[in-house]
Amino acid sequence: EKGGFPHFMLKEIFEQPAALQNTVSPRVKDGHIDLAIPLTESQLAGFKQIHIVACGTAMHAGIVGKYLIEKLARTPVNVDVASEFRYRDPILDKDDLVVIISQSGETADTLAAMRLAKQRGAHTLAVVNVVGSSIAREADSVLYTWAGPEIAVASTKAYTVQLSIMYLLAFKLAACKGTIDAAQEADYVAQLCAIPQLLEKVLETSSRYEELAKQYMHAEDMFFIGRGLDYALSQEGSLKLKEISYIHSEAYAAGELKHGTISLITDDMPVIALGTQQRLLEKMVSNIKEVKARGANVLFICYEGYEGADEFADNVIYLPLSSDIFAPLASIIPLQLFAYYISSLKGCDVDKPRNLAKSVTVE
Ligand code: M6R
């Protein structure tokens, strides 16, 4: 049932290109996006504010969604963990869209947050993987992610397909609002449809991560740093490592380091630095040099063709070139494989980490 893989998690990491394709292609026709939800284009264009509410990895997909929607559709987006949102008396009104993201569709806090949003009259749009789950049944609109069953407790392919829905939603909202034109929509859609091949290329290099894991598996703490979309990915990379390898780690916005955390950087502290955002690369590199100067052991993830990375990084992972906004879909794979091999080499129960349940149906 594991298809020849030692763990479900590794199998599911390798299923990502197909899962992405299955989620995106039914919603794309002739360069346009058809979400097949009961909302007209003018309703989609009319939302004044968007809230994305979820837990854990699903919430991390929401953070990427915020960047994409705000950048392309220019609608303000608030991302919240469901357990905070539901008790915060959030400001919600009838012109708001509330996007609920959940792999299982059964997470107690996420379900309660969705019920609250419905009560307040907002439109609820659920992004769910399990067909017929509670969240899918109760939402006003549903966008299924077609990842297939995800068995490993650590979410991998469900995250990637949640991201792909965030792209489709951002492009669709932008097209409806007119912040992108039809040609730009078609161009973005074509780029998204080409991502599965790019992911196959990243997966071809998977054997390298075992070597890297051997170097970093004895660490007690690690930091993940990035800016913009790379910061969003750092948060997911850090969660993956923590939950399955039991190594403490923190994700930090690289520019925030010198406001406190840099005091923790001492000799040999592993720092996983993401540098896929060209616009922010120079600033990122100076942050890396700052941690390096304090003794950090830097693993740097950037695009192939970036020269000089090995002058300031101890290890470099080169990703096949993609444009900045699509980088998360490629850069998540190194982070997943890094966490996977560390967990597996440490002899941890990769698919069923201690104290965790696949679906958190109680508060
Ligand atoms: O089923 P859901 O997407 O609602 O689950 C949300 C979180 O419990 C889940 O993503 C959790 O953080 C994973 N173990 C992360 O790998």
Image (cartoon, helix red, strand yellow):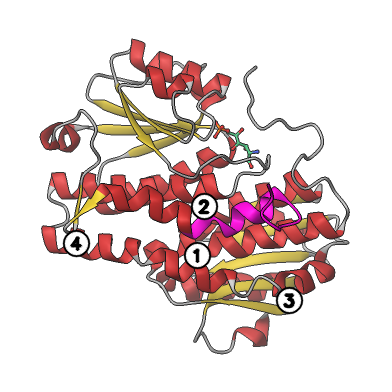
The tag earlier along the polypeptide, 4 or 3, is 4
Q: Magenta segment: does it hold 251? A: no
Q: Residues within 10 Å of mark 1 (few under 14, many from 20)?
A: many
Q: Which residue is mark 1?
A: 330
The alpha-carbon separation of the residues under discs 1 and 2 comes to 13 Å
Q: Secondary structure at mark 2?
A: helix
Q: Identify the residue at image location x=60%, y=56%.
A: 13
Q: Which residue is mark 2?
A: 232
Q: Residues within 10 Å of mark 4 (few under 14, many from 20)?
A: many
Q: Which residue is mark 3?
A: 293
Q: Magenta segment: does it hold 8? A: yes
The tag earlier along the polypeptide, 3 or 1, is 3
Q: Nearer the viewer, residue 325 or 74?
A: 325
Residue type beneath disc 3 = Ala
- Residue 102 lies, with reference to residue 28, above or below; the image says above
The alpha-carbon separation of the residues under discs 1 and 4 comes to 21 Å
Magenta-highlighted residues: 1-17
Q: Residues within 10 Å of mark 2 (few under 14, many from 20)?
A: many
Q: Identify the residue at image location x=65%, y=78%.
A: 316
Give the quadrant of ligand 1: top right
- Mark 3 or 2: in front is 2
The alpha-carbon separation of the residues under discs 4 and 2 comes to 26 Å
Residue 190 image point, x, y percent:
27, 65
Q: Nearer the viewer, residue 242 or 209?
A: 209
- Does the CB distance between marks 4 and 2 fall below 8 Å? no
Q: Nearer the viewer, residue 10 or 62?
A: 10
Q: Which residue is mark 4?
A: 186
Is 26 on the left-hand or right-hand side of 224? left
- Mark 3 or 1: in front is 1
- Mark 1 or 2: in front is 1
The quarter holding residue 137 reads: top left
